[in-house]
Each structure stands twice: as C-alpha cells, then as structure tokens.
Amino acid sequence: MSRPFAILFSGVLLTLVAAPMIGRATADSYPLSSYPMFASDRGTVSTFYGAAGITADGERVTLSARSVGGTGEIVHAAESVRFAIKRGSVDSLCAEIAKRLEGDEFVAIEVIGERIDALAWFDGDEVPIESTVYGECNVS
C-alpha cells in the first residue's frame, strides 16, 4: 500500500467517524449515531400512562406496573396503556387489570394519562398539569 493512499484512506475514515458530531442532533444513522434520544431537548413536560385503583371511600391509588401490565416492567405497563388507548381497546385492558385486582381493596379502575412537569414533580409539586381518564371499569 502506498503512503498517499494510506493517508487518503485514513482521512476518509476519520471524516466518517467525525461526521455525527457536525450533523443535526435529530439525525441518526447506522453504524455511526449521534444518539438523538439523548442529544436533543425534550422539554420538561411529558405524558405518563398508567392506571389508578379507586377504593370504596373514593381514594385514588396509582397502580403498580405488575397490576397494570402483568409484569414488573414499568415501561411495558406504560406502553400497554398507551397502545390500548391508540387501538381503542382501553375497555379490555381495564377488564384485565380489574381481574388481576379481584379481592383487593379496589372497587373500580381508571386507565389514565397524566401530563407532568418533571422539574416541578421532583421539586415537590406532584400534582399533574392535566389528568385524562381514558376508561374506567368496576372490580368484581
């Protein structure tokens, strides 16, 4: 291999490796990634999906991931709710959750989405900006 070719080849390789640093933060490509999920500003307000159990005296209790999604995985539970809302199958998800909670203290289940300001939340203001009930059902 000649020296000029090696220099050219090295220059092209270095340019390819450095390219993600000069691109847009939202651009992403294989095998070189700028990791836009970490590099872009997502703001402080996000919507979190889940479910709440309603007790006989009207207390609203946020349900665990296991109660909502059937596993201990928090993301799985939230995505189960989000997909049910998107597909229009909230009633069947609510019935599944209610079946898991038979015999517990709850008389009803609400499938919810809550918009939360993360900075305010961690500063002690745990009241959602907005709370939407997508479906509700009774626990037998």
Image: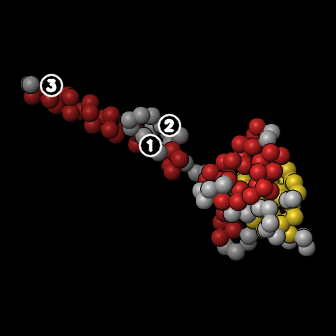
From what the image shows, is residue 80 above or below residue 108?
above
**Residue drawn at 61 percent across, 53 percent down:** 75
From what the image shows, is residue 24 above or below residue 3?
below
Separation (CA) of disc 1 from disc 2: 7 Å
**Three-letter code, disc 3:** Phe
Check whether the beta carbons of the residues at disc 3 and disc 2 lie within 8 A of each other: no
**Residue drawn at 65 percent across, 70 percent down:** 122
From what the image shows, is residue 5 above or below residue 72?
above
x then y, percent, for residue 20 = 41, 39
x then y, percent, for residue 17 = 32, 38
- Residue 117 appears in the rendering: no
Left or right: 78 in relation to 3? right
Q: Nearer the viewer, mark 3 or mark 2?
A: 2
> Which label number is shown at residue 34?
1
- The residue identified by callout 3 is 5
**Three-letter code, disc 2:** Ala
> Which label number is shown at residue 88?
none
